[in-house]
Image (cartoon, helix red, strand yellow):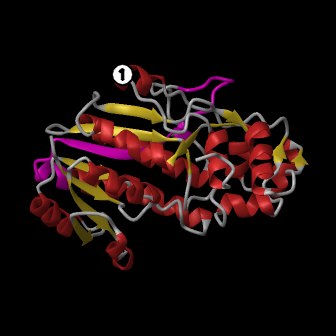
Amino acid sequence: MPLRVVVAGATGVVGRTLLPLLRERGHHVTALGRRSDRLEELSADEVVAADVLEPDSLRIQLRRSAPDVVIDQTSSFGTADPQEALRRTAKLRERGTKNLLDAAVGAGARRFIAQGMTAAYRPHGHDVLEEDSPLWVDAPGSWGDVVRALASMEEELFTRTGIEGVSLRYGALYGPDTHYAPGGDVHARVVGSELPLVGDGVGLTSFTHVDDAAGVILELLEGGDPGAYNVVDNEPAESSEWLPAYARMAGAPAPVALTAAQAKSQLDWLTVHQLAEQRGASNFRLRETLGWKPTWPSWREGFASLFGLWPG
């Protein structure tokens, strides 16, 4: 059945991938974006310049759009300054998503789909983590601020009456126009030998192609229970595995190796954590409850497609 759908953060990498998919299914799509200079390129029935940090105008717009489903894909992880990216993302999760949720309830929406992240899980042993694993709310520094904001957002989302709340916990997003694409931040760091192997390289990363990040939303517009879902591929990978493979595909030098002590003195804390300590996530809940299968089941094929090395 066609639905009326509002997509916030429509100019981001997931939003731009999602919009045409929604329209192909016959849904009426209203795209919200903060940057008006990028709205004209969007595939939507209606495009609106709106800031989720401005609650009054947001409420007016959502009442006008009368959505059945509201999708929040806002993020600031694309900001050039890493600390500023963390600060802005924490603000968006804590205030922006709440404003959008308030407006969605006021407009009579039935379901709200938010953006979470598997990187927020507290690392534990060698486990691949599931949705009931605790979030790392006492993580240090600005990363802790982001995780606490996410935890607060999800608590609000899952307990709000009058609407069904879903949080899609993405892994490391990759694909066209992401940090992993040619010209992106990760690509530049690997080509410049700035992203090393740390210690034994046992930090696990679960990857999510933007095609899968967008595609799963189609399945959850009406289907699936409210709650959190890990949206990741089938193959969590240690940094000692994915980083050299990525470098080879990118035609970059092999990554250098640093001891843990060397890495801590040369790199920021978050990079060391991701490469040496982070744990991956399981997509079991999505596969079992919705029969979902990722379009890109492994980062290997997905990375190869980024560099024109995958047939088709």
Image quadrant in which you'd find residue 16: bottom left
Q: Nearer the viewer, residue 259 or 3?
A: 3
Q: Is residue 201 above or below residue 262?
A: above
Left or right: 120, with 271 as reference point: left
Location of residue 48 (image quadrant): bottom left
Q: Is residue 113 magenta?
A: yes
Secondary-structure class at tag 1: helix
- Please state if 147 lies on the left or on the right of 32 as rendered: right
- The image quadrant that residue 116 belongs to is top left
Q: Is residue 144 left or right of residue 230?
A: right
Give me the residue at 62% from left, 30% from top.
235
Q: Is residue 150 visible?
A: yes
State yes or no: residue 67 in magenta: no
Q: Nearer the viewer, residue 139 or 249?
A: 249
Q: Position of residue 265 (x, y in %)?
A: 84, 54
Rendered location of residue 228, percent (x, y): 38, 33
- In this view, the residue farthest toward the bottom is 37
Q: Residue furthest top?
A: 288
Tell which of 274 and 242 is nearer to you.
242
Say which residue label 1 marks: 289
Q: Position of residue 306 (x, y in %)?
A: 63, 54
Quadrant position of the N terminus in the picture? top left
Three-letter amino acid code at the position of disc 1: Thr
Magenta-highlighted residues: 103-129
Residue 136 visible at all: no
